[in-house]
Amino acid sequence: MTTQEQLTMFLDEHVGWPRPPVGIWAGFNDPMADDWFEQQRPTGAEIGDSWLEDAEFRALQLGTWLNTPDGQMMAAAVEAVSAPFYAEDEKLLVAALQHAAARQREEGVQVAGRNALIALGVAGAAAFLFGLFGSGSGGGG
């Protein structure tokens, strides 16, 4: 399964907010959804940050220290689960995915940098110990 397919499945399972009626149905509001439409919409960063707390999202590995997928793949995944006339929702979800992937990548870069420093420290310590004890054992002839 491709990353885009996995991302599409994640969005399909985790995004379930109501949508305002459009077209000829715009005059017939859902009385149960009125409160939602009057609330302020979350930002892409707020949604993205909440996804970073989700283990299933993190397992997608969108933002690794090596790369982050381009917006076109993310947009295609969003469009696969969204009706074409919900452009505002699509923009919001793509912004959320890009934010979360960028944050996940930053975390990966920090971890990779820390691991590299640890590896250099261990290699330096090993070289020092080898130089200290290695020269004493073989040079007594």
Image (cartoon, grey):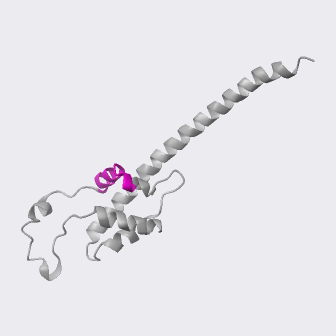
Image quadrant containing the C terminus: top right
Quadrant of residue 114 within the rendered picture: top right
Is 49 within the magenta?
yes
Q: Is residue 43 above or below residue 11?
A: above
Residue 141 visible in the snapshot:
yes
**Dominant secondary structure of the residues highlighted in magenta in the image:** helix
- Which residue is outermost to the bottom? 24
Quadrant of residue 23 within the rendered picture: bottom left
Q: Residue at x 14, y 63 (%)?
A: 37
Which of 57/49 is in front?
A: 57
Q: Residue at x 49, y 47 (%)?
A: 108
Which of 53/71 is in front?
A: 53
Q: Position of residue 64 (x, y in %)?
A: 49, 53
- Which residue is outermost to the top? 140
Quadrant of residue 96 within the rendered picture: bottom left
> Which residues are the magenta region?
44-57
Residue 91 visible in the snapshot:
no
Q: Residue at x 64, y 34 (%)?
A: 120
- Which residue is outermost to the right? 141
Q: Position of residue 39 (x, y in %)?
A: 14, 57
Q: Position of residue 41 (x, y in %)?
A: 21, 58
Q: Residue at x 37, y 68 (%)?
A: 8
Q: How many numbered markers are drawn?
A: 0
Is residue 24 left or right of 93 when viewed as pictured? left
Q: Position of residue 51 (x, y in %)?
A: 33, 53
Is 132 within the magenta?
no
